[in-house]
Image (cartoon, rainbow, N blue to C red):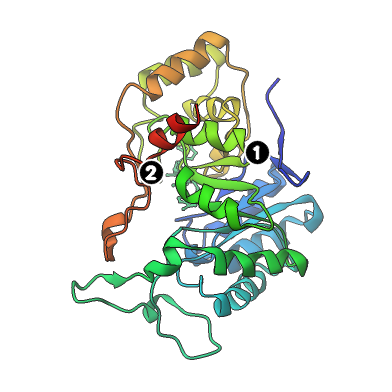
Amino acid sequence: MTQSHFTLNNGKKIPSIGLGTWQSAPGEVAKAVEHALKSGYRHLDCAWAYGNEAEVGQGIKASGVPREEIFVTSKLFELHHHPEHVPLAIKDTLKNLGLEYLDLYLLHWNINFEVDAPAGTLPQFDHRIKGESGKFKLDVALCEDVTPTWREMEKLVDQGLVKSIGISNFNINRTKKLLKEARIKPVADQVELSLQCPQPELVAWLKKNDILPQGYSPLGGTGKTNLRDNEVVKKIADKHGVQTANILLSWLVARGINPVPKSVTPERIENNLKLVDLSKEEFEELESLSQSHPPNRVCDQSDSFEPTYDIYQENHPEFSDKAQFAKEQ
Ligand code: NAP
């Protein structure tokens, strides 16, 4: 039987499929959210950085679905990690969404820009400081140790503004560091997970440590069709009489992953909620297909900063997920 919910390490439940909202254009996303909620979705994946939370809020309102039935996630962006900015950031997100609390607030990236914003105001994109290279400068100390930011996020749980807190784009090494300091354990790590980026070591480690792996770009990313056109996936989809998207999502859920596919197209939104039971052979075929090539990421901004910051540490001899995972076996 396909799974309808995952249970978080604090006992709260999260629906197996969420609606992604990144790159859902203005004028489209309110309708997409309304349609999703009316079609049975009860989980929305949002972020301050997507610049569309006010529209998402309009969609929630227009759907008429009671707030308490919906699991809403948002993310603390990489302009807002300084302790004084965290309370301002959550306030802005809740105001935009028109909500009194979030179900989940994720630390969006383990990176943080240097910003120059007037005291008491929430930094915006144009408050980032440029370095000599012309790239935006990182506050490396706060990237290396996110404890001051995490302490503020823990306070938001105490205040009832968010029910759960989690992380995003964290590898094993960086998550282990956080776990040593955390009073409240992250419930989830939202990372890129798809047939082209399966991250088996990270997924296994998160599950072992009771942190839910959430999968972003599960269909291969906006505007990209290579996964949805894959012949093996098509063959399995035809056998089940479904679209390739359903197979890509069902395989992730069967791996214990919580995917958040994005769509603004009504038929696709409805379609993506359908999960199918894959046979053991089909599951294994997709597993080996996923590992038959080097991982291919949609989201990697490591080279976009000054200094360059190795977000995923994929080739690091000690801190790569492969090395960290092997050390524990
Ligand atoms: P995705 O969900 O992998 O793919 C979205 C693309 O697939 C869109 O072009 C969509 O088109 C199309 N699509 C959806 N369902 C389809 C179907 N049944 N058949 C054919 N095409 C279909 O991409 P994503 O937006 O990168 O990732 C999903 C969500 O993850 C984001 O929206 C965001 O919420 C989250 N995310 C988080 C992070 C992070 O740093 N934490 C990073 C990236 C993404 P239409 O919309 O035109 O239908």
Dot 1, crowdedness within 10 Å: few (<14), some or many (≥20)?
Answer: some
Identify the element where label 1 is drawn. Answer: loop
Image x and y of residue 114, in percent = 38, 76
Image x and y of residue 110, in percent = 45, 58
Q: Nearer the viewer, residue 279 or 156?
A: 156
* Residue 120 located left or right of residue 71: left
Image x and y of residue 232, in percent = 39, 17
Q: Is residue 141 above or below residue 264?
A: below
Dot 2, crowdedness within 10 Å: few (<14), some or many (≥20)?
Answer: some
Q: Is residue 84 above or below residue 62?
A: below
Mark 2 and mark 1: span between their CA atoms?
21 Å
* Residue 256 located left or right of residue 245: right
- Quarter assignment of residue 59: bottom right
Residue 60 visible? The answer is yes
**Residue at horizontal 66 percent and vertical 74 percent from the top:** 95
Which residue was labeled with disc 2? 319
* Residue 319 located left or right of residue 176: left
Q: Amino acid at mark 2?
A: Phe
User: Label for residue 109?
Assistant: none
**Residue at horizontal 40 percent and vertical 17 percent from the top:** 288
For the N terminus, give its image quadrant.
top right
* Residue 273 located left or right of residue 49: right
Q: Nearer the viewer, residue 86 or 58?
A: 86
Which residue was labeled with disc 1? 210
Identify the element where label 2 is drawn. Answer: loop
Q: Is residue 40 above or below residue 170?
A: above
Q: Select label 2 or label 1 by which is in front.
A: 2
